[in-house]
Amino acid sequence: MKILIELPSWLGDSVMCSPAIENLISHFTNVDIILVGSFASTEVFKNHPNVIKTYKMNKKYRSFNVFSKELGKFDYFFSFRSSLRSKVFKFFIKSKNKFQYSKYKYQNEHQVEKYNRFVNDCLGENFCALKLKVYKKNKPLSNSLTKVVGISPGASYGDAKRWYPLEFAKLALSLSTTHEIIIFGGDQEKDIAYDIENFLIKKGVTNYQNLSGKTSITELIELISGLDLFITGDSGPMHIAASFAIPTVAIFGPTSENETSQWKNKNSIIVKKSLDCQPCLKRICPLKHHNCMKLITSSDVLKAIETIS
């Protein structure tokens, strides 16, 4: 059975569709999967035993015809994207069975359940959405005798999702007496990571690593899988941590925990202020005050850590 899957663009969404993909595989036998998506999304599944090839998506419409010919024929095609571009891409794919996710059809439930219900509807199944599943090739890279806490201050969707670097830095300072610190982030989050690092340097902290912009997705997965504690906003790495049941404190502002919280991680807790304006789901605070994040302090997060440590 040869199946083509178009993954969501975002790292976190790709992790959240993993239970649906596992259920899709269990429906068939001898499944070979080819993946199309962003670099980050395809890297999440790089070590999946059923994935035989991945392609980075060329978003130019004029490339779709040639690209579909390169891909060849498939028994099934599933797109976990709801865009017009994906609809056009689906048109060119050579398969008798083609399905596309719709964000308008699947609403008012966790994103994991939305993706899973999409697969159930396509296959006429009634699979439950089990735990997130991310495969890794190696053992955790960290083998220190000291506990290790990961700090992920970035968030790809927009600035409104980001907690303040100074508060992350204060938190890291407090935890540095009991944990080694690893600061994570992508290329676009280097400035935030450096702000945290500079604060730690001024305070004389030496037991930290700033890995922002220095890790591949597969290295990020391996590092997160070996953490003792993870502090993050609503981010892609948060969902990677959930797949390994890493004790996690997630700081939520404008987004909805009902849709994007850690899925089935009993070792997680959310810190938020529950303001009347939450969740606004906006990239930038429409009220200009950003109180959903501004009012959260490092002390709030430290208290949350005590409940899961």
Image (cartoon, helix red, strand yellow):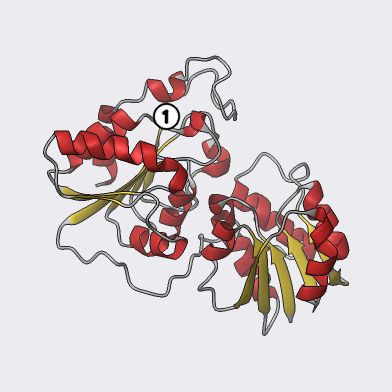
**In the displayed structure image, the side of residue 97 where residue 45 appears, left or right:** left
On the image, the x and y values in percent for residue 38 come to: 62, 57
- The residue that label 1 is drawn on is 272
Q: Is residue 114 above or below residue 76?
A: above
Q: Is residue 237 above or below residue 191?
A: below
| Residue at 83% from the left image edge and 54% from the top image edge | 87
| Residue at 31% from the left image edge and 39% from the top image edge | 194
Decide: few, some or many residues near mark 1? Use Cα within 10 Å; few <14, some 14-19, many ≥20.
some
**In the displayed structure image, the side of residue 268 where residue 3 appears, left or right:** right
Whether residue 244 is visible: no
On the image, the x and y values in percent for residue 52 come to: 62, 79
On the image, the x and y values in percent for residue 231 come to: 34, 43
Q: Image quarter for residue 126?
A: bottom right
Q: Nearer the viewer, residue 293 or 190?
A: 190
On the image, the x and y values in percent for residue 30 come to: 67, 85
Whether residue 1 is visible: yes
Q: Image quarter for residue 80?
A: bottom right
Q: Nearer the viewer, residue 7 or 121?
A: 7
| Residue at 40% from the left image edge and 31% from the top image edge | 163
User: In which quadrant of the rendered image does the N terminus lie?
Assistant: bottom right
Q: Is residue 283 above or below residue 30?
A: above
Q: Is residue 243 above or below residue 159?
A: below
| Residue at 31% from the left image edge and 67% from the top image edge | 140
The number of numbered discs placed on residues in the rendered structure image is 1
Q: Nearer the viewer, residue 276 or 78?
A: 78
Q: Image quarter for residue 55?
A: bottom right
The amino acid type, in three-letter code, at marker 1 is Lys
- For label 1, the SS is loop
**In the displayed structure image, the side of residue 23 where residue 203 appears, left or right:** left
